[in-house]
Amino acid sequence: MSNNMFYTGLSGLNAAQAALVTTGHNTANINTPGYSRQTAQISASGGSNIPGVGFFGNGVKVTEVSRSYDQYLTSQLNQAQSMNQSLTTYGAQINQIDNLLANQTAGLAPQMQTLFTHVQAVANTPADTSARQQLISSSQALANQFRSMDQYLTGLNANVNGQVSGMVDQINTYAGQIASLNKQVAMFGNASGSQAPNDLLDQRDQLVSDLSKLVGTKVVVQDGGQFNVFIGNGQTLVLGGKATTLAAVSSSIDPGRTTLAAVNTAGKALEIQEGMVTGGTLSGLLRFRDETLSNAQNALGRMAISLSDSFNAQQKLGVDLNGDMGSNFFSQASPAVVSNANNSQAAPVGALTASFADIGKLTTSDYRVDATGPGAFKVTRLSDNATVAADSTGAFDGLTLNFTGGVATDSFLVQPTRTGARDLTVNLVDPAKVAAASPLVTGNAFNNKGSAAIGTPKVDAGYLGSATQLSTMGVSLTYDSATSTFSGMPANAVVTATTVNGAPVTTLAFDGITVSISGTPAEGDSFTIGKNTGGVSDGSNALLLGALQNKKTMAGGTASFSDAYAQLVSTVGNKARQLQISNTAQTSLTLQIRTAQQSVSGVNQDEETANLLMFQQMYQANAKVIQTASTMFDAVLGIR
């Protein structure tokens, strides 16, 4: 019996020692990331049957060292922090654009206002060279601001590319470490039977947690405890002891963007659709680039293109101080076409070209053009993935496409406005070449007897083709009271008679010229229309240039330059605030799940201290049992 008592005490001593070691291990790892609290599971060793007496216990045994772990909470936490990280990253990136656009001094709004203020100054004093120089200077400042903002956005894109490349390296590192731990878990699990290598499992869970902060993950546990890890919407990253290698590559669609690819067994990098990448910092970066950065750069480009187009068109309808018709004030970008890197080599370079058909109808979207046969193609607007059909003129959304060469099934990316801000420059350097004056002047004969007077003529683009004829001949109109008509009118003139405030108004339109004669002319009264050869002291065309500030020249005639910029600022600002609100809610949710997870797996110092005292007393008590058993055994020996 004393021998039995000795072994019973020894088993208790060993159990107490195991519990003390486990408690000490918990205390030592209280601040170790990913560590799960461990517990020595103790159970009775059963008993021995003494005939005629009954069963006597054989002490205690340690069945296993378990870890406090909840797979469901861990999975929830990984998903929550993955979404949290995505929103945080997206928000941090978009705030940079929001601060740039909304800046009251560095934004476009004040520069644009200054430009049109100086346009008005030229209209007020068209002969003032200094006013003209101020207009050119403010135009250059505006163009510089467009280019500076575009350069900033291009820098953000380069920064995203660099971060994507860096994160791919980190993901590969984590994947390799998880695969290695999978092998160790399987090896130790087989060697120790049902005993789990708790610390290895914690290390692997921590790696998955760190990985989920970079990219959304889904974990499937195999038989034997190995992890299969998938990212995004199903891309395999880790399969047991093997890890898929990812690569950062230039997008085949747009070489200016770095994207994600999986390297197959043959060593070829196959691109992963960016829409499949969800969660984590990587998703936040890709979403920012796709949803906000590209659109903001396109929106700025559209404004620059529309500004240059409208300003140039009106400038060319005016006369400068030399009496010459105006020339282009600003330079203007052209639509960019990028051939897909996977296109067949048989397709000639530049097989697709694009040109502007109606700049007022341009959107801020890019387009994918898929050739469906020689001369046939399908156009997809990438902002909403809608198929776009061309109108009767072959144009769509203000663009016209032209295929040259034998294109079969290749694909192209069309970026109508991407380089608009980058390519905006001021062509004029000579203040005298600002076309502030109208190209035409009108006159009433000094001996007219009636009350009629001819007004200031308006010209449109159709006038440019007839300017030489008009400058040579001019137009002289003489009123015939018998027929109530004007002689001397061009043959193609369209005459419209109306009444304004009770007075007759006769409007003549020909060769891009529109002019009105108001009032009642007398027999023989004459009026003239001729070319403005001087251009001094006439700011009528400058007034029309100034009117462009509020003219609806964009988005199909629904927005002015200011409207378009305000819409861009509002869109980015609202998105930034929406992300901030969503991220605040997600942060709170993540904290709640982490608290719940830590309540299960975390180490509580007070609890471990109490356990330490309890197991210390257990150790001392069992040592006393052994001492008592030894004393009893010695006493028995002494009797004999």
Image: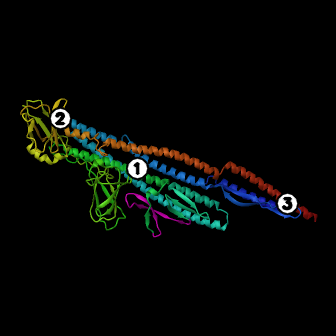
The image position of residue 190, as x and y in percent, is 64, 67
| Disc 1 residue crowd, few under 14, some 14–19, many 20+, Cα 10 Å | many
User: Residue at the location (83% across, 57% down)?
Assistant: 625
Instruction: Specify the quadrant that holds the C terminus.
Output: bottom right
Amino acid at pointer 2 = Thr
Q: Earlier in the sequence, mark 3 or mark 1?
A: 1
| Disc 3 residue crowd, few under 14, some 14–19, many 20+, Cα 10 Å | many
- Give the residues in magenta: 240-266
Q: CA distance from mark 3 to mark 2?
A: 128 Å
Q: CA distance from mark 2 to mark 1?
A: 51 Å
Q: Are marks 2 and 1 in contact (CB under 8 Å)?
A: no
Q: Earlier in the sequence, mark 2 or mark 1?
A: 1
Relative to 471, say whether 12 is above or below.
Answer: below
What label sits on residue 498 in the rendered view? 2
Circle 2 sits in a helix, a strand or a loop, which is it? strand
Q: Which residue is mark 3?
A: 629
Look at the image and tell me whether residue 359 can be seen.
Answer: yes
Q: Which residue is mark 1?
A: 292
Relative to 279, say whether 101 is above or below.
Answer: above
- Left/right of residue 377 with respect to residue 123 in the rendered view: right
The image position of residue 228, as x and y in percent, is 55, 62
- Left/right of residue 231 with respect to residue 532 in the rendered view: right
Circle 1 sits in a helix, a strand or a loop, which is it? helix
